[in-house]
Image (cartoon, coloured by chain):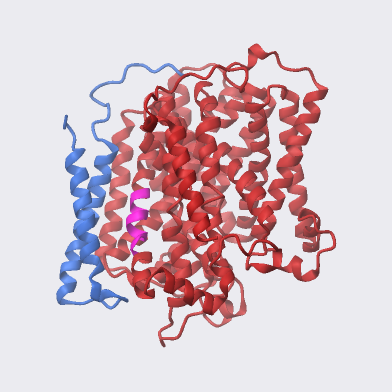
Chain colours: A red, B blue
Amino acid sequence: MHAAPIPAVLLLATTHLIRLAPIDIAILLFYFAMVIFIGFYVKGSTNTSEQFFLAGREMTAWVAGLSFVSANLGALELMGWAGSAYQYGILATHWYWIGAIPAMLFLSIVMMPFYYISKTHSVPGYLQLRFGERARGLSGVCFAFMTLLMAGVDMYAMAVVMRVVLGWNINFSMWVSAITVAIYVMLGGLRSAIINEVLQFVLIWAGAMLIPILGLIEAGGWHKLMAQISQRMGSQYTHLWSTTGSFAANPMGVHWTGLVFGLGFVISFGYWTTDFLVVQRVLSANSLRSARMAPIIGSAFKMFVPFFVILPGLLALVLLKDPSGHLMHLYPDGSPEVLHQGAHSFNEVLPLMMVRYLGPGLLGLGITALIAGFMSGMAGNVSAFSTVWTYDIYRAYIKKKAADAHYVLMGRWSTIIGMAIAIGTAYLVRHSASIMDYVQELFSFFIAPLFGTVILGMLWKRATKAGGFWGLLTGTVASVAMWEMVRLNKANIRFMILQPHASADTILRVQAMAANLYRAAWAWLICVAVTVVVSYCTKPTPEAQLNGLVYGCTVLPSDGATKLYEKPIFWAIVVVTVLFILNLWLW
Amino acid sequence: MTTTPPVDPSTEKKFSIWFFVGVLVLACGAVILAQGIYEFWHPGTTVLANLHPAFWWGLLMTAFGLFYTIHFRPGKG
């Protein structure tokens, strides 16, 4: 679910797109002052481990829900998907709709009760309760490692974007953002991170909404926009599903099976239901009902994110003009036009649209929203790392019995050390940009099989500890192996898409994004198959030990909802209905 | 690890998250609104600047921020 990597051209850029006015800088400075103030302010109420790592489990459904969706709304995500919309057309919307909404609702209705009533503090913590120490150890170490790498990638990405967009020095951007994030997370833990994520959410909506509004006015409305895109790019850019019957009929080279099973099921469910970075936000809710409502609230907002992420990319296809008044053409990263002729790349489409419509003040708001998004991504990774390190590694394997205050102190120190490692990662990425691509791939290696393990753990009481561990390990290794197989020879992708006789043209058309969907689906299937086989070969876990962890062995407590409008399932149905209508509309 | 000792009232949080949201939006909105008013006499050069987006967006944000700041101000209720 992470955004496209930083384009090579950004590393070579010597000019910048935007010049900030004093009024823009004032807005930016006010934001920085506010987040630092919040860190110092909430420090006083983060004295226990529960308060530091889980925000005291006292967040309302709205706060947890906005934080939940905001943790995924980073700046790299916004810029990357706006660029993808320019490149692939409206197909990019799938990553926000079928690639997010069903999974968020599933988390709410099916999985949240188990996370919540088991009183686990993390996803590896749930694996420990269900599958034992080995599964917890494997997932904890992988997750801690990945979050630090991702924090470093976020940091470097922000520094590069700030250099290209604003002309800022890379070292300056990295250190200022790292120190700011380290201060507010170290002081206020998850509570501080959540407050800042809510602020970031509001900033992004306020800063980005104006672009599609003005764009639609300039284009003459939605229908005229679609007509212009069809005329310039072809109708495949304006349809969600009707062109996915074959790999060759759409710009992404994706088939609907990949979208439904790879994206809509495995990747999306893996990310939204087992990635601790987002699940941690919901675990901070103050009641079971809040915890179930939070993902639903998040999904309702998520459904409308394409309005200010995808739509600017589509608008740019027909409205973005160069200084001579001709339609501007954007190119893939690393293309000769970008590298040698000074053309802009796909991923620069959002800043270009900002420059087009936003003057002083509004531009400062938009840039502040982007920076807030980057910092929020870093803070999310670091706060999740701090929790998993302290609970699932340090307390589990290094110091099992210590005072609560000791673990809080470890949480604060691990935030600082984690951020220092992330800075090191950022410099490592700076010297080898391809590392960033690998890091983002690595993250996906682990998430798809993890979802297989967690979902079997929750829904199938026959799954055993050995089954869970070996399924997770095999699925992860298989995912890495498939990735390496395609990296060595792209033609091998034909086995992953089950078309061993695919033509060279078809293979060429299958983009990396589409390949990820199939790799994830296979990794999940392998994980599930191994878990099932090993479980049947090993002794079942007594049902008494599965109470509170597995369907069929647990009496779920009431969430206190009595009226129809209080029930999470009612709102989930409302969201699904709207999602269905939107998909039909853009079919 | 999970026991929560009583929180010292002097350090317990007093500001709602929504108050912070209100202050941030109000501050940004007021600055943008001021810029929008200035642009009535010194028009901007961006596309559709004639619609005065800074003024209208700043006005909307100021109203939203003001409402949240007042509604969720510390000590209310």
The residue range painted magenta reads A201-210
A304 horizontally vs A365: left or right = right
In the depicted structure, whether residue A481 falls above or below residue A456 = below
**Secondary structure that dominates the magenta span:** helix
| Total marks placed | 0
Membership of A206 in magenta stretch:
yes
User: For this rendering, which residue is in front, A193 or B70?
Assistant: B70
Look at the image and tell me in which quarter the C terminus of chain A lies.
bottom right
User: For this rendering, which residue is in front, A383 or A301?
Assistant: A301
| Residue A404 x, y percent position in the rendering | 45, 19
Name the residue at 22% across, 60% down: B58
| Residue A6 x, y percent position in the rendering | 55, 62
Indicate the quadrant where residue A470 lies. top right
Q: Is residue A276 among what the camera can see?
A: no
Name the residue at 48% across, 69% down: A314
Name the residue at 64% across, 50% down: A260
Indicate the quadrant where residue A58 lies. top left
In the depicted structure, whether residue A157 falls above or below residue A322 = above
| Residue A42 x, y percent position in the rendering | 31, 34
A371 horizontally vs A580: left or right = left
| Residue B53 x, y percent position in the rendering | 25, 67
User: For this rendering, which residue is in front, A269 or A149?
Assistant: A269
Membership of B51 in magenta stretch:
no
